[in-house]
């Protein structure tokens, strides 16, 4: 009921102001986050599907994390569009280390999910994750659907099954999917280990099957898909300043995205939020510092 009321308010606002709303760049955005996916693995590693999509879209191997190079700070920055100095999210704890400069009515950071709920309440949003703490930063009060996948290491295909089920049933307009396997291998066996490289093609295939689910759902041609990461590894850890930890790949393809295009502009974790905002014509809060990527074809 709340979303229906907000949608009516948005329509009345357009009608009263006489302002015609710009068309969205696409109707669906799927973001697949590969925890612990560092740039260092891409030259030697086997990831045929991801490398195929690099040619079909835009990509970089030089996306930078925010610091510290850990999961909480970086998945949060991806959604809330701000650096750590503003958000106060410096670790994997559910609460900020220090008082954020800006909070929403939910006492949380204004994520792209929050913007969607406030400005585009008629659109479906969801998150499915293997790392449950991700939901601490997503502001679940703004989500239409969220799911934590338990025992992911014992049932590695559960994330695929849950994601494809949700995609087919609800056809989400904005969906984030978190896959944790590479980070487990990095922590357990170390950066550059045989075990890590053996896991990479398995994760690549999970990404492929999720994308196949988008095709089966019938909106692939009206969709933008991103594959991103939070950090790399140095040895069996991360959180520091080394290139192995702070450089991660990023791939984006789909409707209106430049093909076989290497992104040479600066790209930092919080630029993903600004790019989502551009796609859906969302008004960004003043606290955001990200910049939308220059990956869209000229019209």
Image (tube, rainbow, N blue to C red):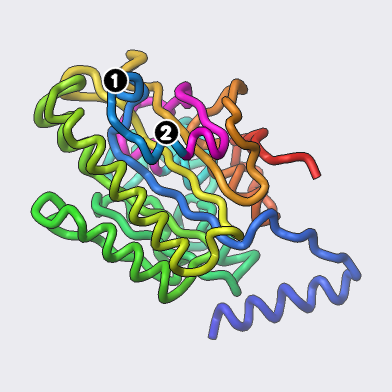
Residue 43, position as x, y percentages in the image: 34, 19
- Name the image quarter holding residue 163: bottom left
Residue 268's x, y, as percent?
51, 29
Q: Which residue is mark 2?
A: 51
Vertical side of 142 occupied by 299: above or below: above
Q: Is residue 224 visible to the viewer in this orientation of the structure?
A: yes
Front in this rendered view, residue 120 or 173: 173
The residue carrying mark 1 is 44
- Dot label at residue 244: none
Q: Which residue lies at the image location 36% right of the left edge and 35% below the top edge?
A: 230
Placement of the C terminus among the 4 image quadrants: top right
> Which is more N-terminal, label 1 or label 2?
1
- Residue in the picture at 66% in, 77% down: 7
Q: How many marks?
A: 2
Quadrant into which the N terminus falls: bottom right
- Please name whichever residue, 86 or 70, is drawn nearer the observer in this view of the structure: 70
Residue 30 lies, in percent from the top left, at: 48, 54
Whether residue 86 appears in this view of the structure is no
> What segment is highlighted magenta in the picture?
53-75
């Amino acid at each position: 009921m709340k979303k229906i009321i907000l949608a009516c308010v948005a329509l009345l606002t357009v009608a009263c102001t006489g302002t015609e709303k710009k068309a969205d760049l696409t109707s669906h955005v799927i973001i697949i986050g590969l925890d612990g996916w560092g740039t260092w693995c891409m030259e030697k590693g086997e990831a045929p599907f991801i490398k195929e999509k690099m040619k079909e879209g835009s990509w970089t191997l030089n996306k930078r994390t925010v610091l510290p190079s850990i999961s909480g700070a970086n998945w949060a920055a991806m959604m809330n569009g701000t650096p750590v100095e503003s958000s106060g999210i410096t670790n994997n704890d559910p609460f900020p280390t220090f008082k954020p400069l800006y909070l929403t009515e939910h006492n949380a950071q204004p994520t792209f999910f929050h913007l969607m709920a406030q400005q585009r309440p008629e659109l479906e949003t969801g998150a499915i994750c293997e790392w449950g703490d991700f939901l601490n930063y997503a502001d679940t009060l703004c989500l239409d659907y969220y799911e934590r996948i338990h025992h992911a290491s014992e049932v590695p295909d559960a994330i695929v099954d849950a994601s494809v089920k949700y995609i087919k049933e609800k056809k989400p307009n904005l969906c984030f999917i978190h896959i944790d396997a590479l980070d487990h291998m990095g922590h357990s066996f170390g950066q550059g280990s045989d075990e890590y490289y053996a896991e990479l093609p398995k994760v690549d295939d999970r990404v492929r099957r999720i994308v196949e689910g988008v095709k089966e759902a019938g909106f692939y041609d009206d969709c933008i898909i991103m594959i991103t990461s939070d950090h790399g590894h140095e040895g069996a850890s991360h959180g520091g300043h080394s290139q192995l930890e702070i450089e991660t790949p990023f791939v984006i393809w789909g409707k209106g995205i430049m093909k076989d295009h290497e992104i040479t502009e600066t790209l930092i974790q919080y630029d993903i939020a600004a790019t989502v905002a551009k796609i859906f014509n969302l008004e960004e809060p003043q606290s955001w510092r990200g910049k939308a990527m220059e990956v869209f074809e000229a019209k």
